[in-house]
Amino acid sequence: MASIDLTASATSLRADLLARRFTAAELLEATFARIDALNPTLNAIVAQDRDAARAMAAESDRRIAAGNARPLEGLPITIKDAFDVAGLHSSGGLPAYKERVPQEDAAAVARLRAAGAVILGKTLVPVFSGDFQSYNPAHGIANNPWNPEYSPGGSSGGAAVAVATGMSAFELGSDLGSSIRWPAQACGVFGLKTSWGLVSTWGLIPPPPERRTLRNADLVVAGPIARATEDLDLILPVLTGPRDPNIAGAPLPAPRRTEAKGLRVAIWAQEPFAPVTKEVSDTVREAGRRLTEAGAIVDEAARPGFRFSEAYEVYALLNHAVIAYGLPPKVRARIQAQAAKFAPGDLSHQALQARGARMTPGLYQQLHQRRLALKRQWARFFQNWDVLLCPPAPVASQKHDHLPDFHARRLDIDGVERPYLDFLCWASLATGSDLPSLSAPVGLSRAGLPTGVQIIAPFGEDRTAIAVGAMLEKTGAGYWAPTEQ
């Protein structure tokens, strides 16, 4: 058997499986050994069924031997604990659901299973996937593999840790408030927030299982987390499509360009409304510099035709309405009661949270019209520009901070305190207008943790964001394993 590099790309691992350099069973056992060695410290994986995984790996080996391999055959993966996985504890981070074992896969999980992925376990999320760090009373605290004093981000924090360390070939994450993009940056991997509606989110918590709807909730998406852009291109066609995994999704549009020469890149590296550290803005500019050297046309003055604050207000009100929908009635009522304290134009996080929780049909219709206007501005912008580069988050990394009141937590922006919920600001540009966005690793911070860039592409053109991430990989940016530092 060849030695197995568990931090190789999933695409490379798949090629080795098909060439029969090692078996799916051997790959799975090597992954279990990696989990046994690393997970006690990192606490990323919170549920496993090794017997079921071994049975899936054996089936993969039979299919490979018969020449009937499916697209993801034999790749051992974990799934964010926000998604239902049949036969595995699926808590959504809530203590009340700690012993809950669904009988049916979430739609995206069913697609991965039907494509031959070997599902071995679940990864840690914050309660109700509602934090930018990953810890909950049921499963404890996940730690960043680069430095355990730091959070791996949230809510897909356990997922990003598993991918970064080779405990999973790739992961399935979800994103409402940068829940894929921020952990991807924090752990130094690629995370794709897909175009809204491209991947079914049926079977995702939130909302609570008893309040599910067939339609994807506004803003919420599912998407892959991986160590290489080639893996995103491998996984995304599997995930795309309706709830029924037997029905293929429509083909995804080809990327606008596959080489940097002639690529039109706008850069939004800093913004007075949403301050970021110099390290963060410098990383965005470094990504632009690398693309410029590769032949791209890069402009830091180009902007869509709207104010950042307008995009943020529309997004934040909808975000808080989506979150409030799944909260216990008493908690929701307590938040709603705060709304009377604030003036109508107050854009503080507390005001937006209360106003969003009180969402009425009239306010929703207003926001719908404002979103349509924002989407039109983006469409005009993308007539002249292929992608927009911007920060994934206000900071490059965040130490553990578990103060119960989010509004009491603070971010350090080069010595200036900012509200913790500023994590939502740079999520708003893509999410509020349903656009695809890739978080791509670029370098390391002064503290020795990963830094990254957010690549926003036109609606439905997810593969353009992936292609630009691949261009950055060619310049020497991208993933490398935390253990190599």
Image (cartoon, rainbow, N blue to C red):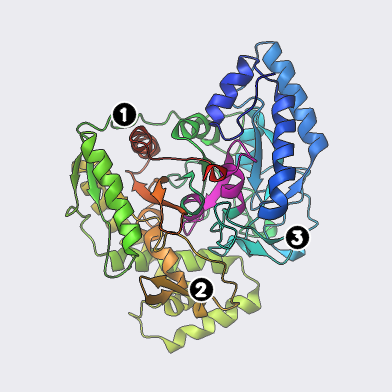
Residue 118: x, y in percent?
69, 32
Q: Is residue 336 left or right of residue 255?
A: right
Which one is earlier in the sequence, the residue at label 1 or at label 2?
1
Q: Is residue 215 left or right of residue 424?
A: right
What's the residue type where badge 2 is placed? Answer: Ala
- Residue sticking out furthest to the front: 485
Q: Is residue 121 visible?
A: no
Q: In what element is the residue under mark 3?
A: helix
Which one is earlier in the sequence, the residue at label 3 or at label 2?
3
Residue 164: x, y in percent?
56, 44
What residue is shown at x 24% (from left), y 44% (from top)?
A: 289
Residue 121: x, y in percent?
72, 43
Q: Which residues are magenta?
A: 158-184
Give the labeled residue for mark 1. Answer: 258
Label 3 with label 1: CB-CB less than 8 Å: no
Q: Quadrant of the N terminus?
A: top right
Give the labeled residue for mark 2. Answer: 357
Which of the 4 quarters of the picture holds residue 318? bottom left
Which tag is nearer the camera, tag 3 or tag 2? 3
Q: In what element is the residue under mark 2?
A: helix
Task: Kindly report the distance in space between the C-alpha atoms of the residues bearing marks 3 and 1.
Answer: 45 Å
Task: Kindly report the distance in space between the C-alpha atoms of the residues bearing marks 1 and 2.
Answer: 43 Å
Give the labeled residue for mark 3. Answer: 97
What residue is shown at x 28% (from left), y 30% (from top)?
A: 257
Estimate how packed mark 1 is, as few (under 14), some (14 to 19) or many (20 or more) residues with alpha carbons within 10 Å.
some
- Residue sticking out furthest to the top: 66
Reply above or below: 321 against 281.
below
